[in-house]
Structures are given as C-alpha cells and as structure tokens.
Amino acid sequence: EAQVTQNPRYLITVTGKKLTVTCSQNMNHEYMSWYRQDPGLGLRQIYYSMNVEVTDKGDVPEGYKVSRKEKRNFPLILESPSPNQTSLYFCASMSQGRIVAGELFFGEGSRLTVL
Amino acid sequence: DQQVKQNSPSLSVQEGRISILNCDYTNSMFDYFLWYKKYPAEGPTFLISISSIKDKNEDGRFTVFLNKSAKHLSLHIVPSQPGDSAVYFCAARGGGAQKLVFGQGTRLTINP
C-alpha cells in the first residue's frame, strides 16, 4: 500500500529537549516536504526537499532542521523545542512528474506538544 | 501575508443540496490550484485541481471553478453527502516556486 508514515503520532515533550519526527514514504517519490497546521493559519511549509541531499526552506523554517540522506526518509529535527512549536505536523511526498500539478501525498500527522 | 484565503471557517449544508466552498488568492503568478480534503486524525488527501488556463474542471460530484480576473476559485459539491463532512483546504502553486501555498481551511458539515 502506498503511504507516507510518520512517527511518533503523538508526543508531549518539554522545552529544550531535542526531538526528531521521522517520515518515510514507499512510493519512490523525489519530492518531500514538512508542513505544520495551526488554527486559523492552515498548512504552512517548513522545509522541502527536491531529491536526496537537496533541501530548502519553506515559509516557517525557524527552529527546525531536516536532512535527506535517503530518498525514502525525510526526518524533521527540533534541536531545542519551544512552546510555539506546539502544532500538528504533516509530512508529504510527491512524484517529480506531478510537481506541476501539486498532488501531494500526506502522512497522518504528528501532534506535538511542547511544555 | 496570506496569499491564499478561505474566509469562511465553517459551512453547514443539508444532505442532497449543493455545497460551495470559496477561496481567494492574491498572487497572479499562481498557475495551478488544488483542493484537498481532510478528515479528523488523517492527513489531507488530494481532491481536484485546475490549471490557470482553464475556468472549470469537473470530476464526478466535484467541480472547481476558476475566475482569474477576480482571483477567486470555488469548489462545488453536488449532491452533498454525509461523507463529504471534512475540512477542505484550497492551495495554489506557481510563480516559479515548487511549493504549494494553502488557505486556512473550511470545515464543511453535511446535515442529514
């Protein structure tokens, strides 16, 4: 089954404790991206990657890091989480051939709470 | 600076009637527009899209209309069914950017 898998799905942590949200896709997609969803703000892009070893900032990259060492994986790293990073996070992937159409496949989301 | 706006946070429609969800945008360089649907505890899923060279695209019960002069697009669902109850996000792409810009979302509730 084609899917984007995120872990953990739910996490409560404390300010300053480094954490990583993993994302893996099994569709051999070149493009991957991270979004955060906040009330009244919709989905905002954090980082994206066009392919292995190619990453770029989205609209709200502050406080986040990413890496793309393998095609299937695109982890999101919060080096020193703060309460304003409490949000619902989505990983998404897309085939290079569908980039013009913008048809993203999303994971189920990871709800992060930073106390 | 919200380039894509969905001004209605929620919409309630009776089953069998038409649902119309609206979206406005400000960037005239957008060349592709999409609608995504999201159920609780799930990720958004792609629903329908339209290129800026068209003014209408239809897929079953779903039709998207694009009015470039007004920088406005709408999603029509006819007839509305209970399973259509979800949050709908419009999104736009273009201007040389590979990213999608999303609206805030509209929660659609279909009442029996």
Image: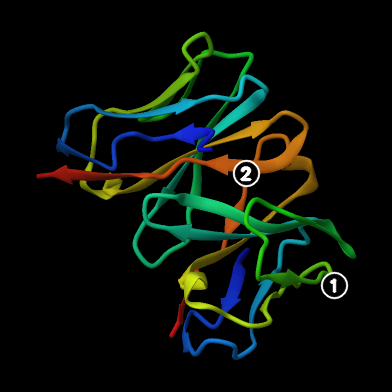
Residue type, label 1: Glu
Asked whether A108 or A3 is in front, the reply is: A108
Q: Quadrant of residue A57?
A: bottom right
Task: Give the side of residue B74 with respect to residue A5, left or right.
Answer: left
Residue type, label 2: Glu
Q: Gap in Å between the C-alphas at discs 2 and 1?
A: 21 Å
State the image coordinates of residue B66 (x, y, percent, origin top left).
49, 17
Residue at 62% x, 44% y is A103
Task: List the residue tagged with mark 2.
Answer: A103
Residue at 75% x, 50% y is A95
Query: Can the viewer see residue A48 in this picture?
Result: yes
Task: List the residue tagged with mark 1.
Answer: A70
Residue at 66% x, 64% y is A62
Residue B55 - label: none
- Label 1 SS: loop
State the image coordinates of residue A83 (x, y, percent, origin top left).
47, 76
Mark 2, residues whose alpha carbon is within 10 Å: few (<14), some, or many (≥20)? Answer: many
Query: Which chain is disc 2 placed on?
Result: A
